[in-house]
Image: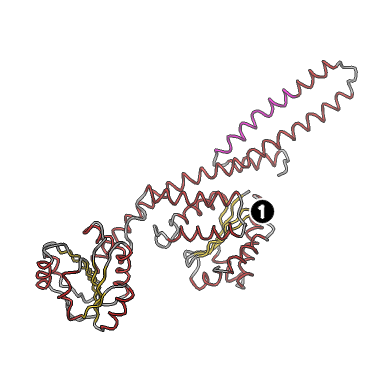
């Protein structure tokens, strides 16, 4: 048996193509049922996200081309997309390459943003759908469970997912460095820019308990505050409320600064010099840069955050190299397991073939030597058995070693071809 992956991703196809062959809801269930009915597909799974659509399948070793054609035709017919529009974007992987790809996908090494956590959950959802439809078996079950454990190992043994690679997450990361635990902290959100709002959501999700929202249009401030279960503050009154805020995120379209050093000096005295973290995402800036010179005040503008993100991306790239080494180790182990599944049947089939030859030739000889005593017959039979065992000993040892060899599958195929062994 072999593993075959056919699909396309953000690396090979634009979104206009990806969206045409995506699976969701009932179409995923219908797709799995149609897929498993293909003659050369014995197990199936569909991974469909905004960045990739991939068919994972288990097939017979000698049917890769036929199975590839079946799956490509299935995608074309199921989504009514002509082959000439689909085929240029499709890739195909089998054997070790497919196993490596499965491990890299679950570990986010093949993602648009390396280290992102969503893909693992999406692959788990795809697996749950396939098992619900009962279209997976021993091979894909083991492949997917191994993929999940590889992803977990990479997240445990590397720092691939620990560094923020977006402006909004960088704000959370910096806030943690300043305050440690964010529980009980209060945010003041000034303006309603998308990035600032996203940063506020991440901070709230990471323990911040209260939010104040200030906006030039007070009704917008009230609406956003209600969504966050916080309180609205008139923009012209922010100075009176700043002392209650541990974290200030500003993103307005104001032409001049809203918060200056003198204002913050007064605010920090009212706070009894407890630390404050200012995040200025606005361009032009809302917060005077000199604010950063006030003791116990930490002010970052959009360029500062982007520098943090760039540094973290470089860190992830280094960690990705370590993650690839882990994938290589795990691929070898999985490949050994796959090969061991082929080794035992090959040995049994070879022994049965040799025993049939021995017994057939022995019977022919015995018929011409009817005057032999029973004792001599047993001696001759024992001799033929010994000869057979000695002849087979070396090939069987080599076959067993093949399970640990990179070229093991080729050696097994060669042995089966030479001796004419049937699957």
In the image: residue 290, left or right of residue 33: left
**Disc 1 marks which residue?**
63
Q: Quadrant of residue 256?
A: bottom left
Which quarter of the image is occupied by the C terminus?
top right
Image vertical order of residue 182 relative to residue 229, above or below: above
Between 188 and 392, the one lying in front of the other is 188
At horizontal 66% and vertical 41% (from top left) the residue drawn is 414
Q: Quadrant of residue 261?
A: bottom left
At horizontal 72% and vertical 41% (from top left) the residue drawn is 421
In the image: residue 338, left or right of residue 361: left
In the image: residue 35, left or right of residue 375: left
- Residue 339 position within the rendered picture, expressed as x and y whole percent measured from the top left: 59, 42
233 falls in the magenta region = no
395 falls in the magenta region = yes
- Residue 112 position within the rendered picture, expressed as x and y whole percent measured from the top left: 42, 63
Prevailing secondary structure class for the magenta stretch in the rendered image: helix
Q: Which contiguous range is marked in magenta?
A: 385-404
Between 113 and 150, the one lying in front of the other is 150
Between 383 and 31, the one lying in front of the other is 31
Element on which disc 1 rests: helix
- Residue 138 position within the rendered picture, expressed as x and y whole percent measured from the top left: 60, 49
At horizontal 68% and vertical 25% (from top left) the residue drawn is 390
In the image: residue 320, left or right of residue 415: left
Between 180 and 72, the one lying in front of the other is 180
Specify the color scheme: secondary structure
């Amino acid at each position: 048996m072999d593993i075959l992956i056919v699909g396309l991703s953000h690396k090979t196809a634009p979104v206009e193509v990806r969206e045409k062959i995506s699976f969701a809801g009932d179409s995923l269930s219908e797709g799995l049922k149609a897929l498993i009915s293909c003659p050369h597909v014995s197990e199936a799974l569909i991974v469909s996200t905004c960045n990739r659509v991939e068919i994972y399948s288990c097939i017979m070793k000698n049917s890769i081309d036929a199975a590839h054609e079946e799956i490509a035709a299935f995608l074309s017919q199921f989504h009514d997309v002509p082959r000439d529009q689909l085929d240029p974007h499709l890739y195909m992987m089998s054997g070790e390459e497919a196993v490596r790809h499965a491990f890299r996908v679950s570990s986010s090494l093949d993602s648009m943003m390396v280290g992102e956590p969503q893909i693992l959950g999406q692959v788990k959802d795809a697996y749950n759908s396939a098992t619900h439809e009962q279209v997976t078996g021993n091979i894909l079950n083991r492949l997917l469970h191994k993929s999940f454990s590889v992803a977990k190992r990479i997240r445990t043994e590397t720092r691939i997912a620990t560094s923020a690679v977006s402006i909004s997450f960088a704000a959370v990361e910096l806030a943690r460095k300043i305050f440690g635990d964010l529980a009980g902290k209060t945010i003041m959100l000034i303006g309603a820019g998308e990035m600032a709002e996203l940063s506020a959501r991440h901070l709230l999700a990471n323990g911040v308990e209260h939010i104040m929202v200030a906006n030039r249009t007070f009704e917008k401030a009230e609406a956003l505050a209600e969504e966050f279960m916080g309180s609205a503050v008139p923009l012209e009154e922010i100075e009176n409320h700043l002392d209650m805020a541990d974290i200030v995120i500003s993103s307005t379209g104001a032409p001049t600064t809203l918060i200056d050093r003198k204002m913050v000096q007064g605010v920090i005295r009212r706070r009894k010099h407890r630390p404050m973290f200012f995040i200025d995402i606005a361009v032009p800036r809302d917060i005077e840069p000199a604010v950063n010179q006030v003791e116990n005040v930490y002010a970052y503008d959009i360029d500062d955050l982007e520098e943090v993100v760039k540094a973290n991306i470089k860190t992830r790239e280094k960690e990705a190299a370590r993650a690839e080494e882990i994938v290589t180790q795990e691929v070898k182990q999985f490949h050994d397991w796959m090969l061991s599944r082929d080794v035992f049947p090959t040995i049994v089939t070879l022994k049965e073939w040799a025993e049939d030859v021995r017994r057939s030739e022995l019977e022919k000889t015995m018929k011409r030597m009817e005057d032999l005593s029973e004792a001599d017959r047993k001696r001759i039979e024992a001799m033929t058995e010994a000869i057979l065992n000695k002849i087979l000993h070396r090939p069987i040892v080599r076959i067993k070693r093949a399970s640990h060899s990179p070229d093991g599958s080729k050696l097994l195929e060669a042995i089966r071809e030479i001796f004419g062994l049937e699957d």
